Structures are given as structure tokens and as C-alpha cells.
Amino acid sequence: MRPGAARPAGPGGGRRNGLPPAVRLIFVGVFIYLVVGFGLQELEVLRLANQVRALEERVVELREANDRLRQEIEYAKTDAYIIEVAREQLGLVWPNEIPYASGTASGP
């Protein structure tokens, strides 16, 4: 065959890498689809991981608030709390105790 002459068409004659352009295009399309799909899945995993982290922090906060409320409930069952409420909110005094006014309007 002389230089510059056209190659004969046939098996392996006119193609450089052995794959027709349509097949190459399909492979490229599938590759792009897979890369984008995996990328989107990775973003979703990161979003869910952040959501889990935020929810775990919220659980810790709620447990601490729950513990504080349990302590307040236990304190509300004591005589000290009942006396405190009777004195501050109801203005009650012990027998033989003399109430006095401090000059500020704080009670009934």
C-alpha cells in the first residue's frame, strides 16, 4: 500500500481503537451517569450524617433538660419547697412570727 492511500474498510481497517463511535458514546454516557450518581449519593450520605449529628446533640440537650426537670419535681415534693411557696407566693408566716414590709410591693 502506498503512503497516503485510503485503508480498505473491513475488520479493523477504518477504526483506530476498535470501538464504533456510538459504543464509545454509550460508554461515556454510562460513565458520566455513574459518576454523577455516586457523587449525589455521597452528598446525601454527608447530609444525613450531619442530620444524625444534630439530632444526637439535641438528644443530649433534652436529656439534660429532663434531668433538671426531675430534680425540680423531687424538690417540689420537699417541705422546704412547700415552705418557700407558702412564704413567697402566699405571704404566710409562722405562728409568733411578725411580718414586715420592706418598702417594695412584692406580695399580696
Image (cartoon, grey):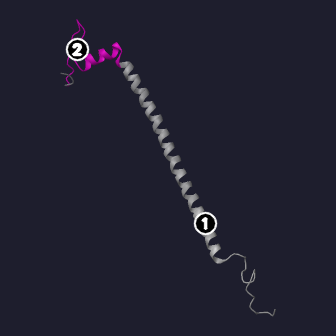
The quarter of the displayed image where residue 105 is located = top left
**Residue occupying image coordinates x 57% and y 64%:** 33
Q: Which of 39 and 102 is in front in this view?
A: 39
At label 1, which amino acid type do we have?
Val
Q: Is residue 52 left or right of residue 1?
A: left
**Residue occupying image coordinates x 45% and y 30%:** 64
Q: Is 24 located above or below residue 103 in the figure?
A: below
Disc nearest the viewer among 2 and 1: 1
Question: Between disc 2 and disc 1, whose residue precedes?
Answer: 1
The spot of residue 99 in percent (x, y) is: 21, 13
**Residue occupying image coordinates x 49% and y 46%:** 51
Q: What element carries label 2?
A: loop
Q: In this view, does 51 lie to the left or right of 92?
A: right
- Magenta part of the chain: 76-104
At label 2, which amino acid type do we have?
Leu
Residue 106: numbered disc? none
Q: Mark 2 points at which residue?
A: 92
Q: Mark 1 points at which residue?
A: 30
Q: Is mark 1 on a helix, strand or loop?
A: helix
**Residue occupying image coordinates x 55% and y 55%:** 41
Q: Is 108 located above or below residue 28 in the figure?
A: above
The spot of residue 57 in percent (x, y) is: 48, 39
Q: Is 12 located above or below residue 60 in the figure?
A: below
Residue 20 lies in magenta, yes or no? no
Q: Nearer the viewer, residue 57 or 16?
A: 16
10 Å neighbourhood of mark 2: few (<14), some, or many (≥20)? some
Q: Is 65 located above or below residue 6 in the figure?
A: above
Q: Main secondary structure of the magenta part?
A: loop
Q: In which quarter of the image is the N terminus?
A: bottom right
